[in-house]
Image (spheres, rainbow, N blue to C red):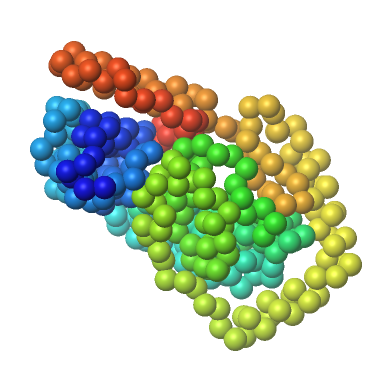
Amino acid sequence: MTPGDFNRREVEAAVLETVLYSDLFDYPLTRAEIRHYLIGLKTDAATIAACLDAPCHLNDCLRQIDGYVVARHREALVDRRRARRAPSARLWSRAQRFARLLAATPFVRLVGVTGALAMDNSADGDDIDVMIVAANGRVWSVRAFAIALVYVGKLFGDTLCPNYIVTENALALETRDLFTAHEFAQMVPLYGLDVYDRMRRANAWVYEYLPNACTPLRVGREIRIGPIARALKRIGEWLLGGRIGDALERWEMHRKQRKFASMITPESNAILDRDHVKGHFNDYGPPVKRLYVERLAQFQDVLTTDGTDFTDVDFSVPSVPSVVEMSEG
């Protein structure tokens, strides 16, 4: 789509939705990020630039400061994002070390950084969130190895959170909403790019929400484990790949299912089975969807008061969980 044939109001509404979604996480966006994460509309960088350089309908809703776009009255977030560059860089160096250890762990097929760190939006002391893909039939064994690394990390003051582990049989994400699409699109794969490519193909629905995010915006240097580590990994998989490993896998799964049974409620988004260890016991989806819709409605009211009719623009979106204030609480 070129600047000459797009619906200007539609694009500007999508820009506003995208900036306000990111605002829930206290995160101003660059123009490149707006284009990449533009909600529900496929367009190019020139179109986004035209809308931001000479907005027709956005009026006074957004501010542009030193290359960042932010909602009005939220200009302080630009300094906050700048301030988080250094702690994010420090956390990335430690995340790389943990990812290298995970990559050398038996049955690990993919390691990706998710959450705030994937967007360079971490403060000192924040968690290192990772998603892991395990070999089929070994998701609980991989979790046990990962939890051992969690304790190692604590010795160095780091908090590693491997709270989403699936097998190669479960690459298709079970929840399909804007939040899940965004989390997957912003994930930075560090190991197992072939599995990551398969996972992208298995979740083509993501591009219905974020049609410009067909390729990752950020790609870390792929971790390649050395020959000794590869040999030890193969030995570990050989030792735990047969009946003994099957028995240990079942024992660990049943043990943890009993332990966490009381924490799984109808409101949680946790899945604990032979293909998933998804420890999302607190589902922020419904309350954050409400916050997001309320935020959009506030800006819609402003636009309407100024004489621009946005009543026929669809501001509604599917469930959108997790904001900074709620996660910190």
66 to the left or right of 32: left
Name the outermost residue toward the top: 305
Residue 225: percent from the left, percent from the top? 55, 78
Residue sitting nearer the eye, 113 or 298:
298
**Measured along the vertical axis of the image, is residue 158 above or below residue 38?**
below
Instruction: Quadrant for residue 259, please give it.
Output: top right
**Measured along the vertical axis of the image, is residue 210 above or below residue 187?**
above
Name which residue lies at 26% across and 47% down: 1
* Residue 292 visible in image: yes
Instruction: Quadrant for residue 37, please give it.
Output: top left
Name which residue lies at 85% across and 70% down: 242
Name the outermost residue toward the left: 54
Name which residue lies at 43% across and 29% down: 317
Name which residue lies at 64% across and 45% down: 278
Name the outermost residue toward the bottom: 227
Marks counted in the figure total: 0
Residue 134: percent from the left, percent from the top? 67, 61
88 to the left or right of 167: left
Residue 304: percent from the left, percent from the top? 21, 16
Residue sitting nearer the eye, 98 or 317:
317
Instruction: Quadrant for residue 90, please give it.
Output: bottom left
* Residue 81 visible in image: no
Residue 227: percent from the left, percent from the top? 60, 86
